[in-house]
Amino acid sequence: MSDKLKISFEFFPPKTEKMSEQLWSAIEQLVPLGPDFVSVTYGAGGSTRDRTHQTVSRIIEETHVPVAAHLTTVNATKDEINQVLDDYWNAGVRHIVALRGDPPGGVGEKFEATEGGYYNAAELAKAATDRHGFEVSVGCYPEKHPESPDFALDIELLKQKVDAGATRAITQFFFDNDCYFRYVDMVRKAGITIPIVPGIMPVNNFGALTRMAGLCGATIPGRIGRMFENLDDDPETRELVAATLAAEQCLDLAEHGIEHFHFYTLNRAKMAYALSHMLGVRPNSGNSQD
Ligand code: FAD
């Protein structure tokens, strides 16, 4: 395992007191692993603007872990977004995950940029770097963005995000590593050199995941579907299957030299912790060299 291995964890802002307890329990378990950063999502259409800010601020106040705030262009003018950028900067945030966001009417609807707003992620990335010199990460799509007619446009847009100042791209979740490897090949051939960090989504609710994957354009290989057959009423076996699959995926990526893993935690620590451990990451003491 590489001694340069990095991990990062993605959380979403909690809605209720109970969800907040779950999030903080996850943060307390995962932060000792020394993640490169943790990130907090921005709800569809900007719906969690205040909650994202509160969550990010609390992480800054109560931990020493670097935190990245997701931000989207949706439902906000440039002035409004600039204000959010200023508020983040003043709260001590130094890293933005700049995203266009999904159509306000829901994934699958036609996207219309907000009048007077930023047009896409590249424009938002440029605003974040120009305004305060934020470190900027962006999203990318190993199976291409569902709205893109082809990979060529997607990769051209990724190039624009890099030109705008992005220094890291985090992928949409995927389950077939070959898709990721093919995508990285295309990106490198296009002259893009920033890290393409795989976003790992451990499957724990197969039904929900199938719906989400359909919307995001992520393919679920048939073999994975078959592994979850007849397990609807058996959460323990489902969890073991999910852990095994995610472990297989991460270890294969690590064998191919991947040095940074971004975990979509869904505010739960257990799976992300176990996967990090398997990759050689240990609490507070750096990475173990096996
Ligand atoms: P962009 O790269 O700007 O573009 C998306 C698509 O729009 C392109 O693929 C293309 O089809 C079209 N497009 C853009 N510009 C042009 C152009 N100039 N010409 C022609 N077509 C164009 N969503 C949230 O709401 N909140 C989050 O916190 C969040 N976090 C995410 C984290 C990651 C790591 C990822 C991968 C996605 C996340 N998303 C989030 C989802 C994301 O907002 C959607 O996938 C959205 O549809 C695209 O965002 P983008 O930043 O990739 O957009």
Image: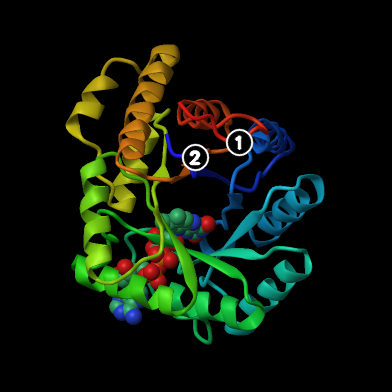
**Residue at horizontal 21 percent and vertical 23 percent from the top:** 226
Percent from the top left, x then y, of residue 5?
A: 48, 42
Q: Which residue is mark 1?
A: 286
- In the rendering, at what x and y percent does residue 183 appear? 24, 56
Above or below, comparing residue 29 to residue 119 in the picture: above
Quarter of the image with the C terminus is top left
CB-based contact (under 8 Å), mark 2 and mark 1: yes
Residue under label 2, please give it.
3
Q: Nearer the viewer, residue 207 or 25?
A: 25
Ligand 1 positioned in quadrant: bottom left
Position of 249 relative to 264 (above/below): above
Left or right, residue 74 beside residue 141: right
Q: Residue at x 64, y 30 (%)?
A: 283
The x and y percentages for residue 173 are 37, 46
Q: Secondary structure at mark 2?
A: loop
Q: Position of residue 248 (x, y in %)?
A: 32, 28
Quarter of the view holding residue 128: bottom right
How is the protein colored in the picture?
A: rainbow
Is residue 90 found left or right of 290 in the rendered image?
right
- Amino acid at the residue labelled 2: Asp
Q: Ligand 1 closer than 8 Å to the CB at disc 1?
A: no
Give the residue type that dot 1 points to.
Gly
Tell which of 246 and 18 is nearer to you.
246
